[in-house]
Image (cartoon, rainbow, N blue to C red):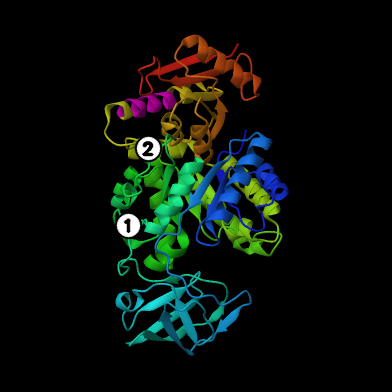
Amino acid sequence: MPRRTKIVATIGPASDSPDVLRRVIEAGADVARIGLAHGTLDEALARYRTVRAVAADVGKPVGILVDLPGPKVRLGSFGDSPVRLEAGSHVTLVPGRDASDSSVLGVDYAELLLDVHSGDSLAVGDGSVVLGIESIDGDAAKATVLHGGPVQGRPGLHIPSDRLSMSTPTPHDLHLLDAFVDEGVDMVAISFVRSAHDIRRVGTEPHPRGPLIVAKIETRAAVENLQGIIEAAGAIMIARGDLGTELGIEELPHMQKRITRDCISGGKPVITATQMFESMITSPSPTRAEVSDVANAIFDGTSAVMLSAESAVGADPVNTVATMSRVAERADQEFDYDAWARRIRLLRKTAVGERSEDKLTDAMTAAAWRAATEMGVAAIICISETGLTVRSIARFRPAMPIVAFSPNDRTLRQLSMSWGSIAMRAPNHIDTLALMDDLVIATRDAGYVSTGETVAVLAGVGKRSRSTDLLRLLRVP
């Protein structure tokens, strides 16, 4: 059976050449993430077009996720060589300064001196360096390095989200978004979301006409407003770096489980991100702890696991993706499908709001899961214009493959992030039983089922159907 958990691979200087990108996709990348916090818009657009071209050549519906920078505060550049900030040393933070060194840190946030207070602890980068604010003096802040370490480039400076004056998405985010909407981007991640209102401010058309919106959960406010964010977004990313800093590292594993559970029970894909195979930036293999981290995220039900610097700037992106794929495939084999489904039956929430057509799809996919399980079908075949049916059945984590047919190419690419789905293009709108029978044969010819096996087919029938209203159990010819 194909791997069920999807892999999101960040594309950067180490992986954006056509040859390496091809091998990254062939090694198992389902979604290509393009971060917009570094580099120029033109560079990002060039990466986007390269991914599109290579994926088309490979013949795989690879989704593209662009990650907007959001109201991220960064220090001025330390340059390409590491600079060590020594514990106990004193530094000055200067808003508007472009460069940083071991004693003066530039900050690209004009409101810094209004948003931080004496006594605050601010994390740098991944949190290995921590600064304690001593005083605000004139046009600068004085700080002591509480925990030292090396820094380079333009690391982030974590300011508690409830202090930040900036909202998300920022005007710069919306400028970047416009360029990628024009390109037909599949998915867009919104950084530092605090409430459902931040999602609504994006203003794009609903997916699949527009991009699927991925809300990054990385602030305390987002945790407090989690249910509203899940309902407003198309998917969720658990951004464990800043989230761990905001909540305290001891809270992170428990919050990760809660967010995963709530997303999947609501029919929304969830990505687990940050430092999953961090050691593979330089090492040919992950640590045992990292392998356990990935496997446990899969046992918790995550839809996708994400590689960041490991695949963007790491020494061997292809090996990293291939290793992640092997670990995920093995964890999929040990996933407790029966226990998960029983749990979701108790937790189940309507997939997307309170519309009657959504409630019907919710009820039909629940019935399909029960019938497919009791009958021991070989596959669940979903026919869906928007992908809603596929995401709704996927929350039950059925033990059999989910074969997803859609005539909409963007829907197929958006389903690249949906757990367990095998995306296949339908030739046109499917609105007759005969056309559905043709897709059963196409599933057989693709090798996912065999003659004589039973399959479940979920679809909407009729040109005016806006929900899943048909379930058929068929023997494969």
In the image: residue 129, left or right of residue 197? right
* 206 w.r.t. 436: above or below: below
On screen, residue 141 versus residue 412, left or right, reads: left
Q: Which mark's residue is nearer the viewer, 1 or 2?
A: 2
Disc 1 crowd, CA 10 A, few/some/many (<14, 14-19, 20+)? many
Spatial distance from mark 1 to mark 2, Cα to Cα?
20 Å
Identified at 30% across, 77% down, the residue is 114
Label 1: element kind: loop
Q: Which mark is residue 206?
A: 2
Residue 59 placement: quadrant? top right
How packed mark 2 is, by other alpha carbons closer than 10 Å (few <14, some 14-19, many 20 or more), is few
Q: Which numbered circle lies on residue 230?
A: none
Q: Would residue 473 be seen by someone viewing this image from the given angle? A: yes
Position of residue 71 relative to residue 208, above or below, is below
Helix, strand or loop for the magenta stretch, by majority: helix
Residue sitting nearer the eye, 414 or 456: 414
**Mark identifier at residue 194:** 1
Task: Give the mark nearest the N terminus, 1 or 2.
Answer: 1
Q: Are marks 1 and 2 in contact (CB under 8 Å)?
A: no
Helix, strand or loop at mark 2:
loop
Q: Which residues are magenta?
A: 359-370
- Picture residue at 59% right of the left edge, 60% below the top: 309
